[in-house]
Image: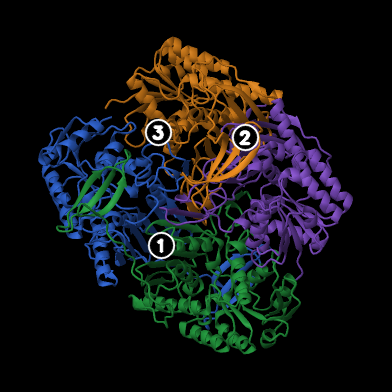
Chain colours: A blue, B green, C purple, D orange
Amino acid sequence: MDGHSITMLGTGLIGDFYTNTLHSQRGRDRVRVVYSRSPERGAVFRDRWAIPESTTDLAAAVNHPETDVVVIGLPNFLHEEAISLVANAGKAVLCTKPLGRTADEARRMLETVERAGVFAGYLEDLCYTPKSLKAVASVRAGAIGDVTWVRSREAHPGPHSAWFWDGRLTGGGAIIDLGCHCIEIIRNFVGKGNRPLEVLCHTDTLVHPIADEDNAVALIRFESGAIGQFEVSWTFRGGMDLRDEVAGTHGTIWMNHFLRTGFEMFTAGGGSGYVAEKAETSAGWLFPVGDEVSELGYVDMFSDMFRAMDEGREPQETFYDGYVVNAIMDAAYRSAKAHAWAPVELDWRGGETPRIASTPVRYEGQIVIKREVLPDGRQKLILKDPATGDFSDRVVAGS
Amino acid sequence: MDGHSITMLGTGLIGDFYTNTLHSQRGRDRVRVVYSRSPERGAVFRDRWAIPESTTDLAAAVNHPETDVVVIGLPNFLHEEAISLVANAGKAVLCTKPLGRTADEARRMLETVERAGVFAGYLEDLCYTPKSLKAVASVRAGAIGDVTWVRSREAHPGPHSAWFWDGRLTGGGAIIDLGCHCIEIIRNFVGKGNRPLEVLCHTDTLVHPIADEDNAVALIRFESGAIGQFEVSWTFRGGMDLRDEVAGTHGTIWMNHFLRTGFEMFTAGGGSGYVAEKAETSAGWLFPVGDEVSELGYVDMFSDMFRAMDEGREPQETFYDGYVVNAIMDAAYRSAKAHAWAPVELDWRGGETPRIASTPVRYEGQIVIKREVLPDGRQKLILKDPATGDFSDRVVAGS
Amino acid sequence: MDGHSITMLGTGLIGDFYTNTLHSQRGRDRVRVVYSRSPERGAVFRDRWAIPESTTDLAAAVNHPETDVVVIGLPNFLHEEAISLVANAGKAVLCTKPLGRTADEARRMLETVERAGVFAGYLEDLCYTPKSLKAVASVRAGAIGDVTWVRSREAHPGPHSAWFWDGRLTGGGAIIDLGCHCIEIIRNFVGKGNRPLEVLCHTDTLVHPIADEDNAVALIRFESGAIGQFEVSWTFRGGMDLRDEVAGTHGTIWMNHFLRTGFEMFTAGGGSGYVAEKAETSAGWLFPVGDEVSELGYVDMFSDMFRAMDEGREPQETFYDGYVVNAIMDAAYRSAKAHAWAPVELDWRGGETPRIASTPVRYEGQIVIKREVLPDGRQKLILKDPATGDFSDRVVAGS
Amino acid sequence: MDGHSITMLGTGLIGDFYTNTLHSQRGRDRVRVVYSRSPERGAVFRDRWAIPESTTDLAAAVNHPETDVVVIGLPNFLHEEAISLVANAGKAVLCTKPLGRTADEARRMLETVERAGVFAGYLEDLCYTPKSLKAVASVRAGAIGDVTWVRSREAHPGPHSAWFWDGRLTGGGAIIDLGCHCIEIIRNFVGKGNRPLEVLCHTDTLVHPIADEDNAVALIRFESGAIGQFEVSWTFRGGMDLRDEVAGTHGTIWMNHFLRTGFEMFTAGGGSGYVAEKAETSAGWLFPVGDEVSELGYVDMFSDMFRAMDEGREPQETFYDGYVVNAIMDAAYRSAKAHAWAPVELDWRGGETPRIASTPVRYEGQIVIKREVLPDGRQKLILKDPATGDFSDRVVAGS
């Protein structure tokens, strides 16, 4: 079983998550060389994950003769440079989220990889959580009818690394850090071919003394009439809140990926160690997750990426998806600034999606608004007279 | 222990809930006479709740010589007329939600009772759920710091009575039916003295063949900077979704009032009977509530109303509150129509609320952005240089 | 609406809960006089609940000329004396749980009230929680078929008052304090006419330096074949764990009365005040209940008691029930000591209950063990040959 | 990255789970040949999982020249024969649960592999669920103090294959099918070196017309004083109930592995397909799990097994563990038959475990029973006089 040999760029929290995932269980893919600006951090990382080599030379890492895939786990402002290097090297490139700081930047990266003809994957882990994968499959199989509304929420007390807080390096605040996840989750549920038309976003900086938003909420209107709603916060208290809700014409989905997953622990203190990402306390009621890299989607994400390479197909999450996400975030920032709905500006490749619609049912010439089953088995109809617009009740025999 | 003697106007679902509450447990207040347009429905209601009299004469019911309180459980378009009658009778009046179909109508009712000098209470039950009362008290005691965001959600598959579906009689669709609850819940959490400035609302009619909205989501911006978010739907599947979430600078509150309250039942079918309001199925996994009238706030609501009368004080929920709610709903409808933020237009009696703010902490001249406790007890600081705006990490000894 | 005038005996935690309940909402019954051994505690209690009088004279309290009901909230070893006084006074008596320290003592109290012909109610609040009342009603309506197993669990970190820890005054440890609740909950679900035949109990003292058990688990075998299982602990960490589970041949019920009721709060600290009975922490994740006296059954319990008095019927929970509970606890203690199953010794008034049974269904002469619906609509049968006892699979067309 | 080449024996549900796990994600181990009694089932299985070969010749499968590991997924009565064949072949053997039908049979299998010196792993998946692994690690790190009690529950509506229902082929009923999981989960929490001394078990056959138990509950007493409690049922309604609870002197753990894991879906019907193992319905409220083979422990189980082989160490779950589980199940069956506690008879290799104990704290010569923090910061002590055994309260200044 041949695996892939990987250049890992970056040794921050995300590099740890990625390498932990790749080297866990019985995985056949391995990190061959890791790049860090700092020789010390590179050495520590190398030893932690049993990687043969570390280097401070970015180009050398990318062009390492024994690797065929480069994983980019660098701060946002370094993505474009790194992608150019990988494209030139003709290797497959997997880039962490968000793809760019702006849609313009993202589109240039997309064009770079398309021009070079290299495999390119967008590492949007939360679209690959096992729950999300199963839920999206259920939606596509018709389990909840047409999707009318998706809420995706990601909130925690703020990032762990300094550069995240500097909008000049990242492109923004909580939206650029967390909203990118929510937007792509929403797109998976409403359908990637469902064009995002416009965005209404409110942002504020309520707690942290920074220039960018530490809270935002936004509505995204799609061509079908579906509404995507994202809520992001760097001021949430209680851990990391990762929840998605989907409403459909025939059903409902609720997912909690982190704080309430069927694992609850009370400790009076005295134990020790890591509870979970963004956990705030180590005593009292705690809510760990089982296998964090699996629950957060990293395992299925890399499986899809490497299988797609092996099978010569596109992965579920592409650079084009990353570009669409950036375009929606750009619209969100424009909306917040203009205090108004803002159109999503993008080169759309996704086709058209019809409006959510149903044909009204008639009963003796009246329009049936609702049908309820009564305890005695009969049905109560709420009817509308198409001529007058008046509404009435009628109880009829059960079907 | 002297109680109150009540005229009940209306025999619909809300009349049942109200009378059930009043006549349950060891309550000392009793319905003396019930009014219904239909003599048959009046008689059935009278017998169900052991009420001495029913009548089809609205004025006679209001002016019944033995009652001192009139409870209005009539459709929205009849509130104003009924309130005038009660005010003329000089009796206490308790009116169901929403107070009016518009803020104008609500203000006229407010003026009517103020002119007459009668006690007036706004029957907003969901602000009185036991969880809400305790949560609001915790917030006021400082348990979660400053409130930054409140989400209130009410969604179900649509009302049971025909008139609810007719916007001419109600004033709108899901917003007027459900949004009124959410708005007042939000006001209780952000503070009733916190002025609502503007609203952004999106509405749509996705499932039911009606003229008014069956789905809406809105943002309300308050003077403090807090955001209230309501989500209402008449197309939700799975029962009645009643949840509130509150984020504060020092804490978080999550409340589920109906579908997940620690009572879970699976039945293969074969039993019988009422499960809960808006329950969609009677087999499979069911989620009943314990004491429905208590969990939905009816018990504490009437206790507050009658105690307030007895003590000569205002109740928690007043006609002025009802008017504010209508003013916010008006702004929501204007916003949806204009596809833009809309200002809340109202006669504000609530004073001023300062902006949420905190004084940045300094460490050796740098601004502290975040402070994390490391597993070894040391602290990691994320710092911002006030001169350059650059961010950096620093690990220091624990406090 | 005439109410009852009450003598309250005892000013401990339970007296607070009782009086809080009676004086809450719009209740028409009032405590007229409270008895305490200590004049100071009596005065404080009297002021807290606006009671006209307090006294240190037990007989005077019982015989107070203006009260018609006496509520006993005294330590276990004082129940018998108090009940005799009330019976002599010819008043209604409501006694807290457990009724006696032993079945012998309980039977004497039962005989005392029966001889005197006074109304007697057993204050077993947890059989009156709103969830329990609705669940028991569902079970009786057939929602889950025959009850095969009931688990009732009550666990917390130990009582607040010194006398609870002294088995000489109470009759035992965690079983006598908590097991009495569980046993009567179990009886309500399996049916009060379902005779408890024998008990297997294991007890241990694992944490507290006391002579009695701080942990116990027991199985109760009923005549129908149903098994009741109770788990009690004074060493639980995390608050008060109050959960019941019921398994039936056609369904399942899970109830969480306290720690997970749809109310979740995270606080970084800084607020203040009472969270809930037995809460261990005031920061981190907290799980308050809404209306504690309602959720714990006190409201419905007193409603049933006073209505039963007014209607001249027995309450749901009688002194006979209290006696049966004591008889089962006696058997539990005998079992633990003998390290063997112990028969329940009692004067049984409950009649006979048939064994849980069903008639096997046949398919072409074979016994049907199980029937599963396959994804394609066909049915898979697992069959047993009545002659050989061999098992086989068969896939047949759907019904 | 070299992986292992596997002979899979058996093509039932467990063979599907095993192969699905091995061939999922980026695993480097592959099934090379599968054995089935039936050539048709063998061929279907082979095609489903892309296995090069299938055969009906057991010995040929075991001795396949290209495999180094044999996985036994056969019915219980075939384990011993298969293990002998593998031991003779000198290959590593991984055997599904339970190891034997009795402890005698299990001990013979243990001796066979020890004599042959081959690697042997016991495929007890539920001890490897990600939640269990993390929880056990927390317990060992001291997070909840000494473990006093473990409840492990597994219940569903009964197995899918005919042979499971025939105690002659399996060794029993629900205990042998499900209890084996629970027992080993309990052992992991109380410590594998903690000797199981005796068992009290109650069994019954309440619903299915079979000779063996369809319900059982048991207590296992360990040397430390800890109690393990298992509850198994083939008559549970609502899906598959997989929950574990652990109580410690300083903490609590609750785990739900299947029915409540943060994934909730309501569907009005109309979708299609597999929901989850043992799901009973495909409409209404459904509770899928994310990645079933990960959540149920299969992924981590095989990782441990193959890593142990590669590293020359024992796996977490050994044939000796399987033998201990069988010895405890034997005691359970003897206990149920004798209606009494039954000693666990086994060759113990685990050493000794001291009794759970703590040294009482003293306060001014009195024994401190409990210490509570009052709202005002003072502490309330419950004290016991060592001379008289009397208990008292004392309020003192806070620490």
Q: Nearer the viewer, mark 3 or mark 2?
A: 2
Residue at 38% of width from left, 18% of height from top? D64
Residue at 43% of width from left, 51% of height from top? A255
Question: Quick one: label 3, few (<14), some, or many (20+) residues within 10 Å?
Answer: many
Q: CA distance from mark 3 to mark 2?
A: 55 Å
**Which amino acid is tagged 1?**
Trp
Q: Quadrant of the N terminus of chain C?
A: bottom right
Chain letter behind tag 1 = A
Q: Secondary structure at mark 3?
A: helix
Q: Is residue C145 left or right of residue C121?
A: left
Reading the chain from its start, which is encountered first: label 3 or label 2?
A: 3
Q: CA distance from mark 1 to mark 2?
A: 65 Å
Q: Is residue D300 above or below residue A248?
A: above
CB contact under 8 Å: marks 3 and 2: no
**Which amino acid is tagged 3?**
Val
Dot label at residue D385: 2
> What residue sits right under mark 3 in the picture?
D299
CB contact under 8 Å: marks 3 and 1: no
Q: Is residue C313 left or right of residue D279?
A: right
Q: Secondary structure at mark 2?
A: loop
> What residue sits right under mark 1 in the picture?
A149
**Rendering quarter of residue C169:** top right
Q: Nearer the viewer, mark 1 or mark 2?
A: 2
Q: Position of residue B132 (x, y in %)?
A: 52, 63
